[in-house]
Image (cartoon, grey):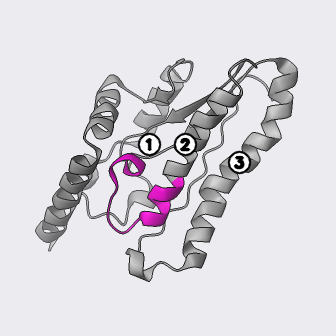
Amino acid sequence: MGGKDENIICLCLFKNFEEHTKEDFNRVMDVNFYGAISLTKAVIPIMKNQRQGKVCFTSSGVDVTGFIDISSYASSKGAIESFAKCMNIEYEDSGITFHIMHPPLTDTKSSSPLPIPREFKASPEKVGKGFIKNIDSKKFLITPSFTDRISVRLSYAFSLPMGKMLVKMTKKAKRDLK
């Protein structure tokens, strides 16, 4: 370990709540949440020995706003955010910090089932370059751009109305595609 080491963990199942089984929730939590815990357990001893370290977890706007058909994913990302807050407090005097990286909706394989036109999704290259540029930020929430930071702040300030608006927009886009 040295310099900047990153690991992005993500599993998203696109099913409505009634279609989700307990096993589906467990699988998503195993990959997203427990994967983050396992990674943290592996790096903490090294970082404590070095008296410094920075752990960044990838989150999602849907853990803040909610969304349809991805309740297991959104719940797992919300758990990661709460975990990062707890770790920040627990390791405050150790030189180790914990952060949440909030990407915008990005044009990836995992977002492809969403009925949203590609032009409304950020390119993975642009998001990656933005995170590289901002990775040294001391802020708890790290975004790839100033515009994304404003969007995330609005999502926190108006979480449920924002989630409902995003669902309406998605449903409209889905109808328009037909």
Tell me where the magenta segment starts and ends, as one range. 61-76
Q: Where is the C terminus found, in terms of image quarters?
A: bottom left
* Badge nearest the viewer, 1 or 2: 2
Q: Residue, x 70% and y 32% (percent of image)?
A: 5
Residue position marked by numbered label 2 in the rendering: 82
The crowding category of the residue bearing disc 1, from other C-alpha atoms within 10 Å (few below 14, some 14 to 19, many at least 20), is some
The disc labelled 2 sits on which kind of residue? Answer: Ser
Is 46 on the left-hand or right-hand side of 106? right
Question: Which badge, 2 or 3, is on the more N-terminal residue?
Answer: 3
Is 89 on the left-hand or right-hand side of 158? right
Is disc 2 placed on a helix, strand or loop?
helix
Residue position marked by numbered label 1 in the rendering: 124
The disc labelled 3 sits on which kind of residue? Answer: Ile
Is 83 on the left-hand or right-hand side of 20? right
Q: Residue, x 51% and y 51% (percent of image)?
A: 77
Question: Is residue 119 visible to the viewer in this orientation of the structure?
Answer: no
The crowding category of the residue bearing disc 3, from other C-alpha atoms within 10 Å (few below 14, some 14 to 19, many at least 20), is some
Query: Quarter-wise, where is residue 175 in the image?
Result: bottom left
Marks 1/3: CA–CA distance: 25 Å
Residue 37: which disc?
3
Please tell me whether residue 72 belongs to the stretch shown in magenta.
yes
